[in-house]
Amino acid sequence: MKEIRYSLGQLYDFTVAVFDAIGCPGSDAHTAAGVLLSADLRGIDSHGIARLSGYVRLQEAGRVNPVPHISKVHETPSTAVIDGDAGLGLVVAPLAMRTAMEKARLAGTGWVSVRNSNHFGIAGYHAMLALEEDMIGIAMTNASALVAPTFSIERMLGTNPIAVAIPAGEQPPFVADMATTTAANGKLELLQRQSKAAPYGWVQDKHGDATTNAHALREGGSLLPLGSDREHGSHKGYALGSIVDIFSAVLSGASYGPWAPPFPAYVPMPENMPGQGLGHFFGAMRIDAFRTAETFKEHMDHWIGRFRQAVPANADQKVLIPGDPERETEALRRVEGIPLVASVIDELRELAARLSLTGHPFSS
């Protein structure tokens, strides 16, 4: 499928204009745009500007508060619970992560659980904020219930990602950012736009049988936990997704499991929801709460360097460190621009017309 490249500046200005048009204050519109486009820069196209229309639809459905009063509802020296007041997760989450970092500055570690929020973009963005201050960052969130537990056909969990960012010295940081499913739902959406089949192990149909149908979710199927099936360790992915759900939602007072608010605005909200909105969980650990940052980063360099020297199975394929592909993609896209497929471009043009935006690359 043909792609067109746009500069980061073009997409950033347009995204800010969209968030401004739905009522977000200036600083929040800029924050949200930065978080959203970090996904496109890092090559995680499923969570970037392709989802912009989805956030607008949530606001139009009354499920996103563009002017939230974000508040702490519980606090200790090293922990806090934050109520996002139904705000954009793209705005609530960075504030919560920085709160965890503030706690860590004083107590050595900081832990923040969030309720009453919405989809927060890529988990890696928030975890990486801690790198600015020689801290280890952790970010996770629960999400729309699309995933069946091992041995089930019922959607009970979200893709529930976990991200961990660890600073190094001369080497780039270690950044792991992954869904607890075999593949994120956004990757299925990309396949749908490109009229491609899904690999086996990503989804099952409504009867619990493996399928390559990228539209299986719309037909009653479900995503599979990391590992795909019991023989390949899906019970481990199921457990990881459950941990994220409990830390993010049960701990904070958000809705959990099958009651998590769905991202598509057209999907009805679950009945008898036990909490408020989506939940997130953030952690920040000051390196020097354990050993000097300089010594730690020297050893991280040593760790990373040795793993880079691991003997490859294929001489033409280098051994990667978590975060390498995204970092390399970001360096390239900052120069060459961000590629968008035709279906995403059409959706953004429709959005520009609906919001009466002019002077942007998607304006008519």
Image (tube, grey):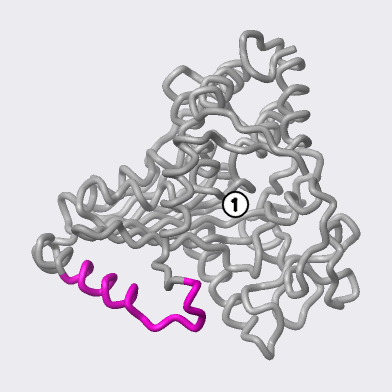
State which region is magenta.
299-317
Whole-percent x, y for residue 178 in the image: 52, 63
Q: Quadrant of residue 226?
A: bottom right
Secondary structure state at the residue bearing disc 1: loop
Q: Is residue 329 left or right of residue 15?
A: left
Query: Is residue 291 shown left or right of residue 41?
Result: left
Kindly indicate the quadrant of the structure image that contains residue 197.
bottom right
What is the total number of numbered labels drawn onto the structure image? 1
Which corner quadrant holds the C terminus? top right
- Toward the viewer: 110 or 288? 288
Indicate whether residue 312 is drawn in magenta.
yes
Q: Which residue is mark 1?
A: 275
Three-letter code for the amino acid on which mark 1 is drawn:
Gly
Residues 16 and 346: in front is 346
Magenta stretch contains residue 241: no
Q: Residue at x 61, y 54 (%)?
A: 255
User: Relative to 267, is 181 on the left or the right?
Assistant: left
Residue at image position (76%, 83%) is: 151
Q: Position of residue 115 (x, y in %)?
A: 51, 47
Give the residue drawn at x 30%, y 54%: 79
